[in-house]
Amino acid sequence: MTERVVAVIEDEDTIASAVAARLRAEGFRVEVAADGPSGVALVAQLRPDLVVLDVMLPGLDGIEVCREIQRERAVPVLMLTARDSEADLLLGLGVGADDYMTKPFSPRELVARIEAILRRVSRAPSPEAAAIRVGTVVVEPATHRVRVDGDEVHLTPTEFDLLVHLGSRPGIVFSREQLLSQVWGYADPAGLRTVDAHVAALRRKLGATLVRTVHGVGYSVEAAR
């Protein structure tokens, strides 16, 4: 089995050391950077399978680091923050992070989230998968492309997976718990706001009416008429 590589970008030494030790015990190769600029350089040099990224960093904050590392290639990112704020959550996920955890967190849960992200991004779409149409949005699972009125729109891997999951089942309402389990691959209630943030990102990029909120139930996309 190919060794999986994780870059940890975290300026609190005790947290960085604990995360690195736990991931190494789980069989990952781990390299650590303690500030934003060195984190960007580490990712460019290491080309890791996943990045664990703190929001509050010296030099460049985690939001800017996420923007920089996503410009080169779509690397999965799990963001960490000490601030339990909706604005941080939306901003972090809006620049390409796949998931989000608030400190303090369980090392076991951190590993579970990382494993879930890596499983999801390693799934290859079937080359025969048919295009999905949701209004003016066309999704091509085989080529991982999304177009709105013919113009291509960039989605992160998680945004894409969420859109395919909803779009391939038009009219069906999914609860946030179902989406967290079926798209993200875990069932921790602390992750429910991640679902909301990704739905908000889809609406921002593809149109405010793309995903319908069914209050008290969950989310759906409308069946084509």
Image (spheres, grey):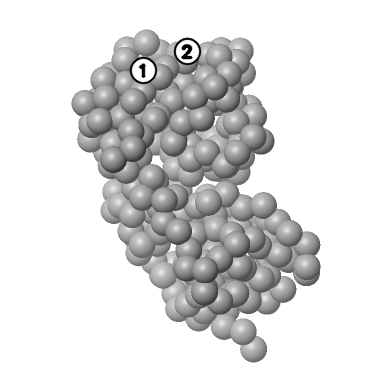
Q: Amino acid at mark 1?
A: Ala
Kindly identify the residue that appears in the image at 54 percent across and 55 percent down.
159
- Residue 186 badge: none
Left or right: 115 with respect to 75? left
Furthest-front residue in view?
Answer: 1
The CA span between labels 2 and 1 is 8 Å
- State the residue at coordinates (50%, 81%): 171
Disc 2 packing (10 Å; few <14; some 14–19; many ≥20): some
Q: Position of residue 53 (x, y in %)?
A: 47, 27
Dots 2, 1 in contact, CB < 8 A = yes
Q: Nearer the viewer, residue 45 or 164?
A: 45
Image height of 172 relative to 188, above or below: below
The residue depicted at 47 percent of the width and 15 percent of the height is: 33
Q: Which residue is mark 2?
A: 34
Q: Is residue 147 above or below residue 50?
A: below
x%, y% of residue 166?
50, 70
Q: How many numbered discs, if any? A: 2
Q: Which mark is residue 16?
A: 1
